[in-house]
Image: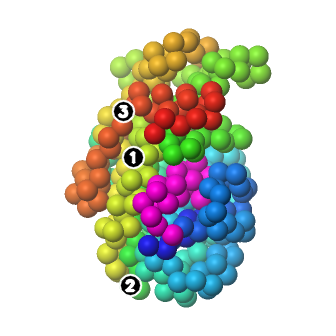
């Protein structure tokens, strides 16, 4: 299969690129490197360092079987403070990409959606039929794109799959998290262990949540399991249909439980301090992954301990275990 990976120099896009290559696919990467890194694109892979709105020039030059679209602005707090660039890039950029996909008759699209489209859930685990009430601009823009894709598949033979990621962690195939602005729990905790001088203790955002230990609960999924779901989505996609599927483990871990697991894996204490709740954080997000099992044949294989072992190896010496 000939695939264009849009956002292939970012964290998840670079792991998916490597998995597609390992499985013998012909991969081209497009990324403007606004947050991704050019050196995350494996040597020998055709790489266009251009804006998503110029994707048509790449799709015009060759016949592609699929586009996998990871390119987005994804900092929740920033999205609330400065919504315009989020609507511009995430929705406007994807609109331009969809136009190019239609014009050049690319049959299949796999899109990175998010659990942030649901907002605070009424019931756990969250199924794909749960109400979508995003609590921040980031989630709202991803929901808008999901709707745009649904409309496109109604009007054309496009086969599309949106994958709603829960909390992605770990490293694989030589790639891992390298965010300049890091907001996520696991990399922040690892940084607090190793960069004691510069970064100081990690802040726990509230210990007064309505959960058993007072800290929020999330569903963590290994980036390699996530990458496999994308490959499975390419074959599961049906012309004229838009499948939206959650990708999570179905298990929830609190912030305290994650920190305890990090201390067990690393053998080191995570320096922490307690701060107020972070605006827009829900108390509890846990996925139902039944639909992904049924429609994609996907079941996650790797545990929270694997994610932390792999993130720790990548954090300490840029190595990946898997
Ligand atoms: N969290 C925290 N301190 C941090 C980063 C995150 O206490 O430095 C908490 C956050 O409040 C949430 C959980 O860890 O309950 C996961 O947050 P993350 O940003 O990793 O992912 P999110 O669930 O927001 O997508």
> Residue at the spot x=55%, y=29% of the render?
313
Q: Which circle's residue, 3 or 2, is located before the other in the chain? A: 2
Picture coordinates of residue 259, whole percent (x, y): 49, 20
Residues shaded magenta: 7-26
Q: Is residue 83 found inside the magenta-colored segment of the image? A: no
From the Cβ of disc 3, is ligand 1 less than 8 Å away?
A: no
Is 127 rendered above or below residue 302?
A: below
Provide residue 77's location: percent of width, then percent of height. Answer: 64, 42
Q: Label 2: state its secondary structure.
A: loop
For the residues bearing labels 3 and 2, Cβ distance under 8 angstroms = no
Residue at mark 2 to residue at mark 1: CA–CA distance: 28 Å
Which residue has dot 2 on it? Answer: 157
Q: What label does residue 225 carry, if any?
A: 1
Disc number for residue 285: none
Q: Can residue 72 be seen here?
A: no
Residue 264 falls left or right of residue 79: left
């Amino acid at each position: 299969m000939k695939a264009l990976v849009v956002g292939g120099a970012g964290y998840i896009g670079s792991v998916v690129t490597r998995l597609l290559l390992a499985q013998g696919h012909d991969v081209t990467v497009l990324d403007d490197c606004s947050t991704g890194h050019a050196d995350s694109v494996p040597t020998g892979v055709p790489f266009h360092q251009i804006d998503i709105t110029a994707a048509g020039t790449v799709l015009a030059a060759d016949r592609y079987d699929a586009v996998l679209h990871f390119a987005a602005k994804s900092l929740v707090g920033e999205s609330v403070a400065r919504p315009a660039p989020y609507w511009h890039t995430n929705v406007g950029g994807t609109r331009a990409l969809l136009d190019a996909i239609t014009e050049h008759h690319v049959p299949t699209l796999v899109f990175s959606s998010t659990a942030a489209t649901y907002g605070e859930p009424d019931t756990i685990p969250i199924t794909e039929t749960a109400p979508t009430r995003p609590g921040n601009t980031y989630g709202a823009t991803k929901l808008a794109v999901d709707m745009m894709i649904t409309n496109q598949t109604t009007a054309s033979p496009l086969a599309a799959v949106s994958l709603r990621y829960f909390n992605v962690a770990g490293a694989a195939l030589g790639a891992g998290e390298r965010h300049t602005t890091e907001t996520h729990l696991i990399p922040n905790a690892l940084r607090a262990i190793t960069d004691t001088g510069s970064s100081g203790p990690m802040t726990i955002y509230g210990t007064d949540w309505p959960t058993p230990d007072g800290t929020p609960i999330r569903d963590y999924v290994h980036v390699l399991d996530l990458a496999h779901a994308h490959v499975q989505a390419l074959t599961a996609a049906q012309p004229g249909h838009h499948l939206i599927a959650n990708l999570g483990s179905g298990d929830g871990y609190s912030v305290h439980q994650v920190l305890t697991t990090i201390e067990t894996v690393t053998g080191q204490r995570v320096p922490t301090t307690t701060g107020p709740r972070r605006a827009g954080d829900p108390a509890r997000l846990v996925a139902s992954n039944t639909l992904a099992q049924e429609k994609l044949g996907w079941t996650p294989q790797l545990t929270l301990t694997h994610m932390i072992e792999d993130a720790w190896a990548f954090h300490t010496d840029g190595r990946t275990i898997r």
